[in-house]
Image (cartoon, grey):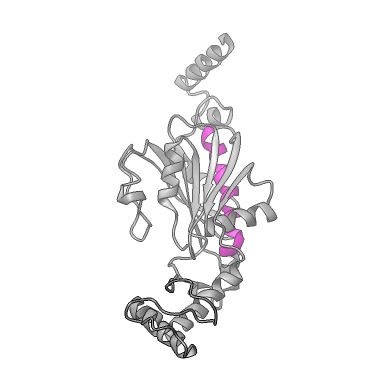
Amino acid sequence: MRTVIALVLAAALALAFGRITTSALAARGLLAPSCESLASLSLSSATITAAQVVAAGTFAPPAGGRAGGRSGQDPFAALPAFCRVAATLKPTSDSDIKIEVWLPVSGWNGKFQAVGNGGWAGAISYPAMAEALKRGYATTSTDTGHTGASGAFALGHPEKFVDFAWRSEHEMTIAGKALVNAFYGRAPRYAFWNGCSTGGRQGLAEAQRFPDDFDGIIAGASANPRTYLNSWPPVFGSWRQVADVSRVDGRQRRAARERQLLQQRPEDDGRSVEDGSVAAAVHGPWHGPLRWR
């Protein structure tokens, strides 16, 4: 303890007499860098576009950001103060991956949590980041390299599809950990992935391709395998257009089916469609009225 106090006093005196700069102190771990100073941090294939402290309870997502919370509640109202860093990652010439990293100004739990996306992504997952931040995590999210909730971005852009498939999450994790290390002066004790649906698939891809990225992965309701999932909606939609059963009242469907059954059994025993006591479709004893499931 006396050694630490002596070092701090020596640093203060050196600053007072201009013998050492604040950047040198930060490099020696004697002075934490400011949030704003992260804007000058050099990261591979990345450009930091913003770095500023957001006061407690004042964050509002940018236009186009997904802001919804559970049960219509504002997920950002109770956020503590944090250092908000935005960056653009370009691992290829056609890449344009947006990420954000949120760093608690105080009360950091020493851990790092990356959060996943849903559907085709196309936006940073601000509500999920807010949940992680409120629990003391340094957290990060990405738009996976495009904007908008459809897969149109991938047409003619194979590298962008790779960014969406797996590369954006890995590049985001590398940059996020570097920012954590720069801001707090040490790496996170543990790193976790937390995602559902597309976020679940992202977690599985991380585990398979980059097992060293995270110490633990929550891959909930994984949207995997993607090929089968993407082929199902067109097939189902086509069937709905042909059959269009949604436009037929349930009681009408039941009555039509019961008439069909009666036609298949001419020797019905007098029970009628009207009173619901229709004979069974197969020859045999009576087992009660037809139950529509």
Is residue 165 found inside the magenta-colored segment of the image? Answer: yes
Judging depth in this view, the residue of 234 and 206 nearest the camera is: 234
Judging depth in this view, the residue of 180 and 6 nearest the camera is: 180
Residue 164 pos. (x, y %): 56, 64
Q: Quadrant of residue 181?
A: top right
Q: Quick check: can you spot residue 45?
A: no
Q: Which residues are magenta?
A: 163-184
For the point 53% across and 25% down, the residue is 20
Q: In the rendered image, which quarter contains the C terminus?
A: bottom left
For the point 51% across and 63% down, the residue is 145
Residue 245 pos. (x, y %): 40, 81
Q: Quick check: can you spot residue 285?
A: yes
Q: In the rendered image, which quarter contains the N terminus?
A: top right
Residue 31 pos. (x, y %): 50, 27
In screen coordinates, is 152 left or right of 169? left
Relative to residue 275, is residue 176 depicted above or below?
above
For the point 55% across and 36% down, the residue is 111
In screen coordinates, is 28 left or right of 17? right
Question: Magenta-highlighted stretch: main secondary structure?
Answer: helix
For the point 48% across and 88% down, the residue is 265
